[in-house]
Image (tube, grey):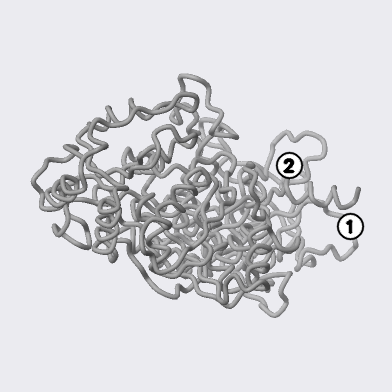
Amino acid sequence: METQSPKGPHFIEQIIMDDLKNGVVSEIRTRFPPEPNGYLHIGHAKSICLNFGLAEQFGGTCNLRFDDTNPAKEETEYVESIKRDVEWLGFRWHALCFASDYFRQFYEWALELIRDGKAYVDDQSADEIRETRGTLTAPGKESPYRNRTVGENLDLFDRMKRGEFEDGFCVLRAKIDMAHPNLNMRDPVLYRILHRDHFRTGGNWCIYPMYDFAHGYEDAIEGVTHSICTLEFEDHRPLYEWFLENVSVPCRPRQFEFARLNLTYTVMSKRLLLTLVNEKIVNGWDDPRMPTISGIRRRGYTPSAIRRFCSEIGVSKSNSMVDIEFLQYVIREELNRDARRAMAVLDPVRVVIENYPEGKTEMLEAENNPEKQEDGSREIPFSREIYIERDDFMENPPKKFFRLSPGSEVRLKHAYLVTCTGVVKNDEGEIIELRCTYDPESRGGEAPDGRRVKGTLHWVSVPHAVKAEVRLYDNLFTLRDMSEMEEGKTFRDYLDPDSIRVLKNCFVEPGLASPEHLERFQFLRQGYFCADPGSEPGKPVFNRTVALKDTWGKMLRKEKAE
């Protein structure tokens, strides 16, 4: 599995190489630490590939650790989905860990801070703490409870733990510096009261540590050498180090930050993604329009494509916006190489080949993938009546229309040359059937006299066609950069009403009647599709992964040519 950037070592790889060379560490230990309060998205995939990839690359280990310190938002469902996503991406954790495994040790370290005069119980409300925190240009105001004695604080913290106080009545804060230029160092909250059962520890605790307090200690307990976070935690690093310096931890991990993944036409906020799910704007966490790993998987993306994408966008310390077309280019290139070809008619019109024998069926040979000759071929049935795409016919075509029209000749893929001889319409003037003749000597699509035929159409034999549902997905949002929403507008104002189109009257060749779970295909002239998990035998449902259009690939080829 390729994990290192093809462009050479990025800055974190260089740090690790230097640390190993200089004896700073003897073994690399990383971790991927999601909070189980939602499903993972493609931004998490970048972090997964980075943390697990570095461990593999340098012969170290990587833990999967759940930061489950907030029982109000965390569930077993999310834990299981995260485990499934990490495994699907092709990674295996060294140890499966939970912050809740360390609740007793966190408590002991909190007591250590209190005994050393470095933490105190504050009776101020959350609003009062926020108001007295100060600003970037003005210092904060010390709490009136900041100078409580060690004995008072130990007693109050014990009473917090025993459940004597209501939620929000008081908190435990670190005693650092209310005038510190970094707001995160202005007496941050370490513990809050929350009378809520935890999905793992039940009702054993009614006080829970804050993420900043727990994070570094979890790393220390697990012996993490390189704690890799996204850039929003850069300002938290001094606090991370303060906690480690002021209690008796077994080791001192170091934190490094990298730029998170921002993708065009996409939101990555768990809060917004949860809103999309709860308000049924999408059909669950695995809706193929969602940027979740489960949604991307259901749409037909492969683990190898996601890993390649994460590798090629690189790791840096500068935030940037990655074009979703590049992600589509990566999967399109892989599926072009690997996906089995098939014919599917999404908007059918019937064609009767009048000079073809009635009742006759021919089995025609078709290659499964021209890019992989070892994939062999299949047989597809051909008969007197076929379906073609409705927009492959025009009664009064413009110039350079190389598809079917009255009197014109086209090639049927893998089959014969046919010429349109007539049109049948209903009482409303709608075309319901086309009449054609075929050239019996043109089997395989080549004219015996060498005449040139420009148009080639895909088709499906009517008597053998399998009815299918096809879902055409597009971007969920219309705004390229969702961080640039106009003032007064919300994400709802940028929802694309055409982000999904469900076609229920499609027909596919008989070999696609009962596809395997998430089996991937290139539908000729249509795009790349996969079989939805909701398909039933004889009633297939296909999700479009990506269209054939390749704007990004054309741009890359143009750049190389220049």
> Relative to residue 90, is residue 137 depicted above or below?
above
Q: Which residue is mark 1?
A: 451
Q: Which residue is mark 2?
A: 406
> What's under tag 2, amino acid-wise?
Pro
Comes first in the chain, label 1 or label 2: 2
Label 1, residues with CA under 10 Å away: few <14, some 14-19, many ≥20 = few
Q: Is residue 8 visible?
A: yes
Give the residue displayed 50% in from the left and 20% down from the top: 487
Answer few, some or many: residues within 10 Å of disc 2's Cα (few below 14, many 20 plus, some between 14 and 19).
Answer: some
Residue 371 point in image, percent of width and height: 73, 70
Q: Quadrant of residue 282?
A: top left
Closest to the observer: 227 or 93? 227
Note whether 420 is above or below 336 in the view shown. Answer: above
Q: Are marks 1 and 2 in contact (CB under 8 Å)?
A: no
Q: Position of residue 16 (x, y in %)?
A: 63, 66
Tell me if residue 259 comes above or below residue 4 in the rendering.
Answer: above
Q: Is residue 169 above or below residue 211?
A: above
The tag on residue 307 is none
Which residue is more in the foreground, 460 or 357?
460
Quadrant in the picture for the N terminus: bottom right
Residue 152 percent coordinates (x, y): 16, 45
- How many numbered discs? 2
Based on the displayed image, in which of its 4 quarters is residue 373 positioned?
A: bottom right
Q: Left or right: where does residue 278 sit relative to residue 434?
A: left
Q: In the depicted view, which residue is nearer to us: 384 or 227?
A: 227
Amino acid type, callout 1: Arg
Q: Residue furthest top?
A: 488
Between the residue at mark 1 and the residue at mark 2, the CA separation in whole angstroms equals 18 Å
Res. 189 image quadrant: top left
* Any part of residue 335 in sight: no
